[in-house]
Image: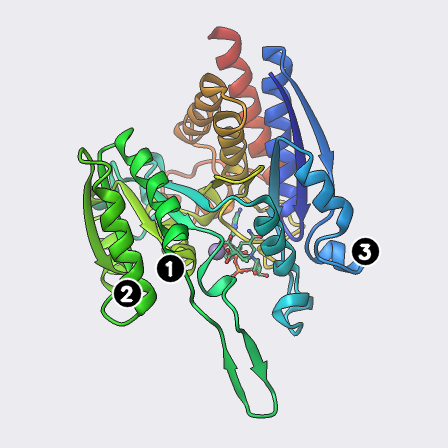
């Protein structure tokens, strides 16, 4: 298998975690006779400083010319006073729009080894396995008009969806549910918002194409509670852009750390892969970042862009094994009654790599 993978490591812990993901992918390539060509380009704050733009033209061109893009994270406190369209985050939103992927898959599952790290009781989270399907190109993030009018002291954003935008992401959610546990929970605010009423009506229509998949609707406020009380109740959770952003971070509580969560964005010209977490300025540059979310994101590249299901599953099994052996990064050791060894970012990456190697050699 030949894959051209563009690395846009970005800011803060982005380069630290993507280095580990790339190292794991290189191991998979060398053991399996695959050629993965990695190219690196700037995005986000580092690109604002060096190139004067959060998404330089050559980064965009390289992204469009690749088979998959792996993004670390963008953003930093020094950019916080910039308007939204000038910030590092704007580079990521422009990249998402240009690549065209509208279905952002965010799997969140409980690792029994990490149960002690969650404030939820083990019997609540044990076995939880949720796939968030977050619409990524619509809603408040992209709706026009948007403005902060400094003269009148008003600001507005527009939450806008078309029927087709809802239908296409809903179809992906139902297709994925039909290969899992046949249930879609669609999350909206249809008791208040017209956009959500369109969302609910469209999702209900699409559901008729999938008679084997059960559909339920939940309001986003209640859903944020149900997720913590009964996470095992959910299979595929389908929702619009902002609600999906918020609920997927909330689901980090089920997994034990935000640093564990991967994502893949499909449906466009080139798939985009990003861990769910951000640039974590509070821990950047200290070797404290958990690289497992980025490494699991690498597994999603192999699954969704390379068709390498076995290798993807080996990476996922290796992460589980390293956790079962007791290795932790600091975010996974907030509660550490057994005194497990706490590793740096690179040490954790090396453990996963060794395990991947052993598993692939013995496979
Ligand atoms: P964040 O996800 O960066 O961090 C939230 C908390 O989780 C912090 O305490 C951080 O230390 C911790 N954390 C996150 N990832 C971790 C990891 N891999 N290992 C250990 N701990 C981890 O969110 P924030 O602090 O709200 O945002 C910081 C910046 O990141 C902002 O500029 C924001 O816009 C940006 N951001 C970018 C992306 C992205 O590029 N995909 C995603 C989210 C946030
Ligand atoms: C995420 C992030 C991004 C989002 C930001 C950085 C634009 O929070 O990927 O979850 O809101 O989509
Ligand atoms: Mn987010």
Q: Quadrant of residue 188?
A: bottom left
Foreground disc of the pair 1, 2: 2
Question: Which mark is first along the chain, 3 or 2?
Answer: 3
| Dot label at residue 243 | 1
Q: Do the residues labelled 3 and 1 touch (CB within 8 Å)?
A: no
Q: Which residue reaches farthest right?
A: 50
The residue nearer to you, when weighing 160 against 278, is 160
Rounded to the nearest whole Å, what is the CA distance between mark 3 and mark 1?
Answer: 33 Å
Residue 287 lies, in percent from the top left, at 63, 45
The residue nearer to you, when weighing 300 against 187, is 187
Residue 103 lies, in percent from the top left, at 44, 44
Q: Judge whether 352 appears above or below 359 on screen.
A: below
> Along the horizontal axis of the image, is 341 left or right of 280?
left
> Along the horizontal axis of the image, is 67 left or right of 158?
right
Q: Are marks 1 and 2 in contact (CB under 8 Å)?
A: yes
**Mark 2 residue's CB less than 8 Å from ligand 2:** no
Q: Which residue reaches farthest bottom?
A: 152
Residue at image x 49%, y 21%?
Answer: 307
What residue is disc 2 on? 189
Rounded to the nearest whole Å, what is the CA distance between mark 2 and mark 3?
Answer: 41 Å
Secondary structure at numbered mark 2: loop
Q: Judge whether 221 appears above or below 125 on screen.
A: below
What residue is disc 3 on? 51
**Whether residue 120 can be seen here:** no
Secondary structure at numbered mark 3: helix
Question: Which mark is first along the chain, 2 or 1?
Answer: 2
Disc 3 packing (10 Å; few <14; some 14–19; many ≥20): some
The residue nearer to you, when weighing 2 against 206, is 206
Residue at image x 53%, y 28%?
Answer: 305
Residue at image x 77%, y 45%?
Answer: 58
């Amino acid at each position: 298998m030949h894959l051209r993978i563009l690395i846009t490591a970005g800011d803060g812990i982005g380069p630290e975690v993507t280095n580990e993901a790339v190292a794991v992918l290189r191991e998979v390539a060398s053991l399996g006779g695959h050629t993965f060509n990695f190219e690196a380009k700037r995005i986000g704050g580092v690109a604002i400083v060096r190139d004067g733009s959060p998404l330089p033209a050559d980064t965009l061109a390289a992204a469009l010319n690749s088979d998959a893009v792996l993004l670390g994270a963008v953003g930093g406190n020094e950019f916080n006073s910039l308007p939204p369209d000038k910030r590092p985050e704007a580079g990521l939103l422009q990249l998402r729009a240009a690549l065209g992927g509208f279905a952002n898959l965010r799997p969140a599952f409980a690792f029994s080894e990490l149960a002690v790290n969650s404030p939820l009781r083990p019997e609540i989270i044990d076995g939880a396995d949720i796939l968030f399907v977050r619409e990524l190109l619509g809603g408040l993030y992209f709706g026009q008009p948007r403005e902060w009018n400094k003269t009148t002291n008003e600001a507005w954003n527009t939450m806008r969806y078309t029927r087709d935008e809802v239908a296409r992401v809903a179809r992906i959610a139902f297709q994925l549910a039909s290969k899992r546990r046949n249930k879609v929970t669609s999350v909206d605010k249809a008791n208040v918002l017209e956009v959500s009423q369109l969302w609910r009506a469209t999702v209900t229509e699409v559901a008729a194409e999938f008679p084997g998949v059960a559909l339920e609707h939940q309001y986003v406020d209640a859903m944020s509670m149900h997720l913590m009380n009964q996470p095992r109740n959910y299979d595929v959770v389908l929702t619009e852009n902002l609600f999906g952003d918020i609920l997927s971070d909330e689901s980090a509580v089920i997994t034990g750390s935000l640093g564990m969560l991967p994502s893949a964005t499909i449906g466009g010209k080139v798939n985009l892969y990003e861990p769910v977490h951000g640039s974590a300025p509070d821990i950047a540059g200290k070797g404290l970042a958990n690289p497992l979310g980025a490494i699991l994101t690498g597994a999603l590249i192999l699954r969704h862009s390379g068709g390498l299901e076995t290798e993807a599953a080996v990476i996922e099994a290796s992460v589980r094994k390293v956790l079962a052996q007791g290795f932790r990064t600091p975010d996974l050791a907030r509660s550490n009654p057994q005194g497990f060894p706490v590793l740096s970012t690179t040490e954790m990456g090396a453990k996963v790599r060794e395990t991947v190697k052993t598993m692939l050699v013995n496979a």
